[in-house]
Amino acid sequence: MSGLLIAAMMAAILVLNTSVLRAEESAVPAGTVITSQNWQQYKQYMPDGMVAMFAGTVYWKFPQDIQFEVGPTQHYAPPKPYLDNTEKYSRQVNIINLPNGGHSITGYVAGLPFPNPSEPLKGWKLLVDNWYTYVPYNLCTAGWYFMFEDRLHNISHDTGVIVYRRLSFISDVGSPINDPKAQGVDYAEFLQLITPEQARYTTELTLYYTNPAKAEDQFLFIPSLRRSLRVSSQARCSPLFGSDYTYDDTRTGDFNGGIARFDAAYLGEKDILAFLPEQNDAAFADLNNYYPNLSFPKPALGKWQIRSTWKIDIHRVPSEARGYCYSRRVNYMDKDLYVGVWGDLYDSQGKLWKSTYSPIWNASLPGEGKHMVFGGASTIWDQQAEHLSLTIFENAQDRLMYSQDCSNYHGTDYNNVRKYSSISGLAEILR
């Protein structure tokens, strides 16, 4: 590793540790309870969408009895293989320009692509880091719960199975960097409905490729037709199973759009309140632990932290922007996790449309110990259509599992690549 890269990484660590220390010393003391009466004292630590919900200028607003319990700011590090791969391979990453006016990378192997992002293209480099942030090579659950609520507080819900599989660029103990069965796929997202009965076995599969300039392939298995249909890459704004999430919203860090069709402007640094619960248990499946008619987590689910973030404005490159749903997505990206912990989404006129917090919790990973990764719950509030969607990733019987634990999930092998992470598996659903 070159001396220059070592110095850059040490500088990044020093900046990160200094910002965390500052948050602990001078921001919001642990034990503070933020309410509807005192929230303006802490307004400077809130994303714009959160401010609007406290101020009551949007449809979905915080109730009078809202409470944010603030805990101490913690430091989180990814597993050692991810750090090792960052040190070993990040200097090989190069940026290339694409014909559509966007950018891509070459030379990426594993770990963090840009451990010390700087100008030019700092915002886009942060977006790339977000895209390749650490995730376990598999996360699987048969306890997925999806709840929808409209302005009249009518509620409906779905349940199902999720298998999110990293097949390339892996940084887990005992795993190769590239799965032998990857066949050029980086990441596979498998989502299958179990209820309601009339939609049972409806399945969505998206394949993202190791070449980030290659558009993802998306398929929808429709049980009544007993076959799968290819979904156009232009349908990224479509609602996921009728929810307020689009296909570009559903990934760790609330962004799922890839790096080749998007750019990102760096807007600066900001310390914000973020929900990073230390516990990971079935309390998340208890709807009594969410404020009614808002689906916002109560203190029973965990404390909020003051987190040092980079604020970036994510948007389609001009050649890809026509007809796209969002004019921009303002993402508050945690400096430890390289993940957006809160997102505000704006319509084509630049007006606030949706806000969401990311599903992250401190989970025990096989062979890795505890790490802050995808899990828990997330809510997205559509302030214009006056809808909301809550997604919870486990229940008391069907927990969210990771990596090799997915090989025997109540007798099911969710690490079966052919069945759950490839198009051939869709043909076997009703057999």
Image (tube, rainbow, N blue to C red):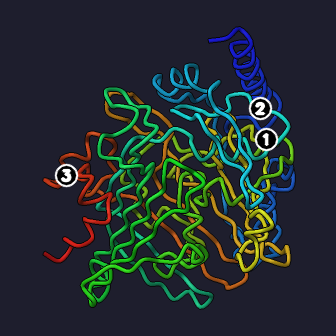
Query: Crowding near pointer 1: few (<14 within 10 Å), some, many (20+)?
Result: many
Q: Position of residue 134 (x, y in %)?
A: 51, 38
User: Would you say residue 196 is visible in this rendering?
Assistant: yes
Q: Are marks 1 and 3 in contact (CB under 8 Å)?
A: no
* Viewport quadrant of the C terminus: bottom left
Q: Position of residue 97 (x, y in %)?
A: 74, 48
Asked if 169 appears above or below 260 in the picture, the reply is: above
Q: Quadrant of residue 197?
A: bottom left
Q: Nearer the viewer, residue 76 or 12?
A: 12
Asked if 194 appears above or below 4 in the picture, the reply is: below
Q: Quadrant of residue 327?
A: bottom right
* Viewport quadrant of the N terminus: top right
Q: Please name the residue that numbered disc 2 is placed on.
A: 23
Which-is-in-front pick, marks 1 and 3? 3
Q: Position of residue 58 (x, y in %)?
A: 78, 76
Q: Which labelled disc corresponds to residue 271?
A: 1
Q: Which labelled disc corresponds to residue 413?
A: 3
Amino acid at the residue labelled 2? Ala
Residue 137 placement, left or right of 382: left
